[in-house]
Image (tube, rainbow, N blue to C red):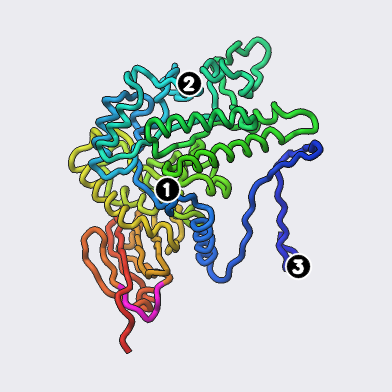
Amino acid sequence: KLENGRLHLTACIPGLQIRLQPGEEISGPRMLIGGYHGALAEGSNRLRKLIRLHYTPKLDAKPFAPVATYDHWWDVWTNFDEPLLRKLADAAAEIGQEYFLLDAGWYSGITNPDDFGTGLGNWDDVDSVKFPQGLQPFSNYLTTKGLHFGLWFEPERVAGGSWLARQHPDWVIWLASGPGKEAPDHTGQYGLLNYGLPAVQEWVEKLFDRYISKFDVRYIRYDFNLDPLSYWDSADTDGRRGIAQIRHIEGFYKVIDWVRTHHPKTILEGCASGGRRIDLETARRFHTFWISDQTSEPDIVRWHLHGLNYFLPGNYQYVCFARPKPELEPESSFQDFLGGAFGVGGRIDQWTPETKARTEKHVDVFKKLRRFLMEDYYPLTLQSKDLKSWEAWQFHDPHTQEGFVQAFRLKSEDSSFYVCPRGLQSDAYYRFVDVYSGESLELEGTAAMERGLAFHLAKDESKVFTYQKISYTKK
């Protein structure tokens, strides 16, 4: 609260009631507090820069930037085998993807094709029907296509009856089902792998180490689809409420830190039923986030990117174009994804040559723009709540005075709109180039920022201008 010109902040772990043992320590949530002068965008960009420079993990000792990742999940789900995946890899390479993410369902024990979780805990048993010779031939095939191998894991959730549940029952926290309802091996239940145990932490580290080393895995999706609080509460004893949660989270951080340190060339993506684990601590450990499971609707994706870019650089914002009938989509549906880490998903092997060519065009544009996603962000309009307006954003490198401006005409009745870029030098000239058509114009910085850049679009159209400083105004 703000009181007498001073800001008072109170933070806590709800329900925490712990009597510490002599010499015992616990950690709490990380907080970041800062101030800024000027418009909201000034504070937002200070935060983005701070996250980029001091939080974002390096990849192979180099600054990390957004990548193009294909994910097969949509319209494939767990119903795949290696021949189908090879067709998908062929198409992914055609449209310019850089990583191929083998999503959930590659392990044995899935008893319900609609629930990929039924095999969780069988991590060392690759599904022999889908992969008769294991994962190595498919990993090798991806290499021949110029794609890096990505693999999905959800280690913290354990299916009853799985190998892990049977071999290490003392590692798993189960919820009571009531008298007479609980199967002896917890079949039909999900348990929480207790990351508070050092033995569990070591086991998970070795699990990742084996797969990354053996199959040259360069991308890990680390998923988590369980509400853990009731499990932690059930494990706590009197006077120790909250200790299971604290030790679990400490163990989680330790595991991710270990993987990142020992495998610096592997991208780590944080996922939790969408974006439910995005915070300062995970931003320090993961290179990117799966920001939402609501990724197949372009308007929702644009909404998310418009808002999340206030806080996080573009590398953290993995979004996946996975429309069921992309041949019917306007160009703007693809272009809605340009404000984040633009990936592609679904049955791309069934796409027509024309659709593949369209997608490749937009992916190529993304690759030209992606370095700017790490720089300053200016929302040039409000987030559209009703789709009856225009929307626009800008990504700007203040050091090189380059960037791009993108505008969207949604269902607005206004066919023209003037967008005023930010951060330009008033006494310099800039060349603006339509990144798709190549058409260009030159404007003085003052004119661009005060009078604006004109966009003339039909409904459901978008246009992107890149720009760069070309000279100073002649006196």
Q: Amino acid at mark 2?
A: Asn
Label 1 vs 2, first from the N-terminus: 1
Residues in magenta, as a range: 424-430
* Badge 1 or badge 3: first in the primary sequence: 3
Q: Position of residue 302 (x, y in %)?
A: 40, 51
Q: CA distance from mark 1 to mark 2?
A: 30 Å
Q: Secondary structure at mark 2?
A: loop
Q: CA distance from mark 1 to mark 3?
A: 49 Å
- The reply to whether the C-beta atoms of the residues labelled 2 and 3 are less than 8 Å apart is no
Q: Position of residue 408 (x, y in %)?
A: 34, 57
Location of mark 1 (residue): 60
Q: Nearer the viewer, residue 10 or 153?
A: 153
Type of amino acid under label 3: Asn
Q: Earlier in the sequence, mark 2 or mark 3?
A: 3
Q: Amino acid at mark 1?
A: Asp
Judge from the rendering whether residue 257 lies leftward or rightward of residue 84; answer left or right: right
Q: For marks 2 and 3, give the CA distance.
A: 58 Å
Where does label 2 land, which residue?
122
The label on residue 4 is 3
Q: Residue furthest left?
A: 353
Q: Say whether residue 146 is left or right of residue 229.
A: left
Q: Is residue 351 visible?
A: yes
Q: Are marks 1 and 3 in contact (CB under 8 Å)?
A: no
Residue at position x 75%, y 64% from top?
A: 3
Name the outermost residue toward the bottom.
Answer: 475
Q: Does residue 425 belong to the magenta stretch?
A: yes
Residue 78 sits above or below residue 440 on the image? above
Residue located at (35% from left, 26% from top): 135
Q: Quadrant of residue 451?
A: bottom left
**Picture coordinates of residue 153, whole percent (x, y):** 47, 31
- 412 drawn magenta: no
State left or right for residue 18 relative to residue 52. right
